[in-house]
Amino acid sequence: VKADQRTLARELTGDPDTSLLDLVDNLLNRGVVLTGEVVLGLADVDLVYLRLSVLLAAADRVLPPRESG
Amino acid sequence: LSLLWVYAVTHAGAARALGSGAVGETLEVLDEGSLAAIFGRLARPPATTRESLEGHDEVVRRLAQGHESVLPVRWGQALASEAELSAALTARRAELCEALGRVAGCIQMTLRLFGRELPVGETGDPTGEIPAAAVEQGSGSEPPHSGTGAGTRYLSSRRLLREQERSLPELQSLLSALAPLVREEKVRRELQGPLVGSVYHLLVPGRLTQYRRTVASHRRRLLPWRVSLSGPAPPWAFGPPEGL
């Protein structure tokens, strides 16, 4: 297990190719969500966070469907 | 200091070598039953900038290096007190423990498929949102029931759409070749835009070299689709199901 852990550590530190797309997808659209409500009432930037979260997580779902034909 | 900014969840008693958080705050651990949350105390949430996201990502990567099993917590998860954090962990205990077991010792690799968006007339879906290939080669599900009630047809179409959102038949040959190497796979098709979809793979680091070689060997065969590969990363996509 220790050898595997060392390998894991090496891989995670070894020149990760983290694009802005990965950052946005991973940090705003993925990951464990413990609660989605507490941040809302804490500070002035919270509205920014909420707006970004909704747009980045669901923009392709909230846009109106295109007309066919 | 008014909020707890959470970076990761791990097993109770496992947290170690925590260091500092994204804005230099001391990282702390809160144990709740068999779970532990790693967090920092902040006066206010960080501004929503690329630098903030990168800072959060760096902390999660460092925590993943030092722990056998870590679930990254999405940016923006802040709680008002230890009591609220404990309650959040308690409420999700079963699914968090199950997810920690699945990601133990693993890394995440991400494939992204880019290509032109098909014109409406080329799609096989009346909404024009799903490429014809996805309809023809999709998950093998039953077609929507025709000739039944409107409610049944609506629910059937919703089910088919949902299945198509988790299918990338354009990548089938590559995904089949990678299947023996990965522990778990999640697929997400985008409904529009040049990003056709993403595939998230959970694998042990020992398979990474072969995984990369397999992807490289398939690039030309996949033309005109373009495939990008990123990682390794902590297992962002393998926490409890989305939407919770």
Image (cartoon, rainbow, N blue to C red):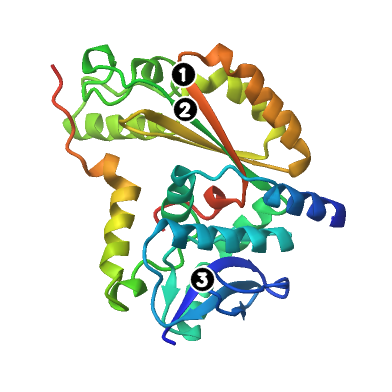
On the image, numbered disc 2 is attached to which residue?
B113
Query: First in sequence: mark 2 or mark 1?
Result: 2
* Residue ID at (30%, 18%): B118
Q: Is residue B95 above or below residue B105?
A: below
Q: Is residue B120 above or below residue A4?
A: above
Q: Quadrant of the C terminus of chain B?
A: bottom left
Label 2 secondary element: strand
Q: Is residue B57 above or below residue B79?
A: above
Image coords of residue B8 (percent x, y):
57, 66
Q: Is residue B35 left or right of residue B131?
A: right
Chain letter of disc 2?
B
Image quadrant where residue A33 sits:
bottom left
As shown in the figure, which amino acid type bears the numbered disc 1?
A: Trp
- Tell me the chain of label 3: B
- In the foreground, B100 or B193: B193
Indicate the amino acid at tag 2. Leu
The answer for how far apart the CA atoms under marks 3 and 1 are is 38 Å
**Secondary structure under badge 3?**
strand
Q: Secondary structure at mark 1?
A: loop
Nearest to N terminus: mark 3 or mark 2 = 3
Q: Which residue is mark 3?
A: B6
Looking at the rendered structure, the kind of residue marked 3 is Val
- The disc, 3 or 1, on the residue closer to the chain's N-terminal end is 3
- For image coordinates 20% across by 35% down, the residue present is B151
Q: Which residue is mark 1?
A: B225
